[in-house]
Amino acid sequence: MSRPRPTIKTDCKAKINAHLVNGTWVVTTVENAHNHSTISPQKSRFFRLHKYLEEYSQRMLDLNDRAGIRMNKNFGAPVVDAGGLENLDFQEKDCQNFIDKARQLRLGKGGGKALTEYFKRMRLQNNGFVYLIDVDEELRLRNVFWADARSRAAYEYFGDVITFDTTYLTNRYGMPFAPFVGVNYHGQSILLGAGLISSEDTSTFVWLFRAWLECMDGRAPKAIITDQD
């Protein structure tokens, strides 16, 4: 809503109507005539539905970025390989989005190892400390979750209603910080677990909530307060 994109209605009659009859879709009306210009098939690649960054291009973009090649030259490689920009199913912006996410997954040089070592030390100091790590296909650290004994004990008393919001803080790698927060008898906020996630998509949130639920012995809260996302 902060950047509205108003459209102009032309009262176009083009449409396809269908209804379900005994489990089968039956087309009843087809009107192909448009009263406005339409997108040519050559430009259909600009639609989000038609964009596709295949595994080979992903691998080359990632390798070139690791070698320090800037995005404008990095994007030029698949353009030349495909014989022209019009033959690609993706654009430079799609490549930039992929590289941004890949950089988050790398977690910096030695960052994943350092984090794992830190969790191990915390586990030795606190028997109630729990952590879970999620890695991708190349065994790169993707998401992490942790909770100490105090957070787990507090959840027994103050776990009826929690708040969850990933917009609170991000680290220098651009990974959203995802805290689970409750309120005690004095109206004070208490931490009931936390995570660092590589993205804010459905699969990531599913992993994070399952990790948190496993840590809390499968006891779900009665209500969760979060933002519109």
Image (tube, rainbow, N blue to C red):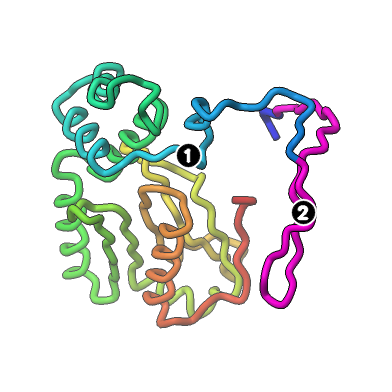
Classify mark 2: helix, strand or loop: strand
Rendered residue at 67%/75% (across/down)? 23
Mark 2 Cα shell of 10 Å, populated few (<14), some (14-19), many (≥20): few
| Residue 223 visible in the snapshot | yes
In this view of the protein, can residue 107 be seen by the observer? no
Q: Position of residue 60 (x, y in %)?
A: 20, 34
Dot 1: element:
helix
Q: Is residue 27 left or right of residue 102?
A: right
Residue 95 location, quadrant: top left
Q: Residue at x 25, y 23 (%)?
A: 74
**Label 2 sits on what residue type?**
Asn
Residue at image mark 2:
17
Task: Work out whether residue 89 or residue 116 is closer to the camera in this orientation and state it.
Answer: 89
* Residue 49 position within the rendered picture, expressed as x and y whole percent measured from the top left: 51, 42
Look at the image and tell me in which quarter the N terminus lies. Answer: top right
Q: Is residue 17 magenta?
A: yes
Q: How far across and down, in percent of the image, does residue 64 sit?
A: 18, 28
Q: At x 44% / y 37%, what residue is drawn?
A: 51
Q: How many marks?
A: 2
Asked which quadrant contains residue 194, the reply is: bottom left
Residue at 60% x, 57% y is 226
Up-down relation of residue 124 to residue 93 (above or below) = below
Q: Amino acid at mark 1?
A: His
Q: Nearer the viewer, residue 118 or 45?
A: 45
Name the residue that disc number 1 marks.
50
Which residue range is magenta in the image? Answer: 5-31
